[in-house]
Amino acid sequence: MALEPKKNAMPTQDPALRAHNFNEVALGYTEEIALSEAKRCLNCKNRPCVKGCPVNIDIPSFIMQVKNKDYEGAYQTITKSSSLPAVCGRVCPQENQCEGVCTMGIKFESVGIGRLERFVADWHNSHSTAAAVPPASNGHRVAVVGAGPSGLTCAGDLAKKGYKVTIYEALHTAGGVLVYGIPEFRLPKAIVAKEVGTLKELGVDIETNVVIGKTLTIDELFEMGYEAVFVGSGAGLPMFMGIPGEALNGVYSANEFLTRSNLMKAYRDKNDTPIMKGGRVAVVGGGNVAMDAARTALRLGAEKVYIVYRRSMAELPARREEVEHAEEEGIDFRILCNPVEILGYNNPDDKRDPKNGFVRAIRCIKMELGEPDERGRRRPIPVPGSEFELDVDTVVMSLGTSPNPLIKNTTPGLEVNKHGGIIVNEDGLSSRSAVYAGGDAVTGAATVISAMGAGKVAAASIDEYLMKK
């Protein structure tokens, strides 16, 4: 039978409808579509997809199980390597990883591996009622700092080996960027809660509202009897441009804007969450977070949303799928331009901070691409005399984040790089004995799956260290 050259399309909500609701945009494969897609897998001997997966899921095996309609077996195969299959199936950039090296992709479109992973995880979540069974205890205790992707993965892998793991999370809900950063329409929070619940069934304890470096220190965790600590505290410190007007009311970091919407549920009419709704919004940046912020602003009632990005569409770092969804929903991409000032007006009736006033416009300058920089991307160069203004009420800065210095400042001997990331070796071990780290706390803002891969590496290293000990 001839192979289908193109992967099966993902069913989605109509753009005209989804632009005004927070329901999930991608609807998921039906069983019929999943079986059709699974047949496209060549089950090749060299298995490049496994090598391209940061957590090394046995992809050919789980797809073969889908072909055979053994969906629960496929789920068990995936969860041998991944603690968050329903999450990864939705937000992992498969096109740059497993699907990017898929043999089918040499001549045709690669197999929709991520879409099949999501199908399997969703099938399990809707059909299985059996709780995860915790293994026998091995008598060792490990503390994990941060309940984001890297921390959850590290905790899950250690729990499966019999470790007693406690996660300490600064926020009131476990999930990290999965709950505060990624919008409901891309990743429903019920999915995250389900994945976290599975870890709890394995025996993982999660202590929320505990800020390591403030409530407790790393040294105090060791005094409490933990034999190793994994730091997966993420990168929650936002970056700004340092241009005039960034202190105006109506200027947010993307972190703050998305946290107010996602974690504080600003999208619910009954919630009185302080956030700017409606009006005209400019989101500065071109990554996945910028797409999330722009599409969230639209759903919160903005009449017009701009993406302001200093390079061209070809250089946008966001996933192509997210860019396409944003375009379909009516987001206006103002490429090859860069903000130079945020303009405001004073409102003496405002008792919060009348001297700062409110945003009324963002002044930009047009750019052109020059010679490549050290990473091979052509440098954006301002075009003299090309300044213009966009009338907006809200500006969201999505320029990346760096690790919060709190843990570094309260942990003697913990070395960090110039960006504040914890320095670790190939095993995830820091400069402090028995202190491991991974994810955005090491690399700065990166992908969910890369953070999971780091958590997995650290878990294996902690296990080896404590077994030898």
Image (tube, rainbow, N blue to C red):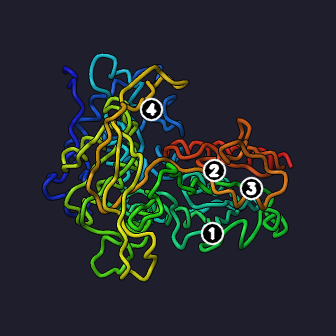
Query: Which residue has dot 1 on it?
Result: 205
The mark lying in front, picked from 4 and 2, is 2
Separation (CA) of disc 4 from disc 1: 32 Å
The mark lying in front, picked from 3 and 1, is 3
Separation (CA) of disc 3 from disc 2: 10 Å
Could you tell me residue 174's position as x and y percent? Answer: 53, 66
Three-letter amino acid code at the position of disc 2: Ala
Q: Secondary structure at mark 3?
A: helix
Query: Which residue has dot 2 on it?
Result: 441
Query: Which residue has dot 4 on it?
Result: 97
Q: Residue at the front extreme?
A: 385
Query: Which residue has dot 3 on it?
Result: 408
Q: Which of the two discs, 4 and 2, labels the residue nearer the N terminus?
A: 4
Crowdedness near tag 1: few (<14), some (14–19) or many (≥20) residues, C-alpha within 10 Å? some
Could you tell me residue 257's position as x and y percent? Answer: 41, 63
Q: Which of the two discs, 3 and 2, labels the residue nearer the N terminus?
A: 3
Three-letter amino acid code at the position of disc 4: Gln
Q: Image quadrant for the N terminus?
A: top left
Three-letter amino acid code at the position of disc 1: Asp
Q: Which of the two discs, 3 and 4, labels the residue nearer the N terminus?
A: 4
Q: Which of the two discs, 2 and 1, labels the residue nearer the N terminus?
A: 1
Which one is nearer the viewer's eye here, 354 or 125?
354
Residue 98, quarter of picture: top left
Separation (CA) of disc 2 from disc 1: 21 Å
Residue 73 vertical position relative to residue 315 in the rendered view, above or below: below
Give me the residue at 65% from left, 72% from top.
210
Crowdedness near tag 2: few (<14), some (14–19) or many (≥20) residues, C-alpha within 10 Å? many
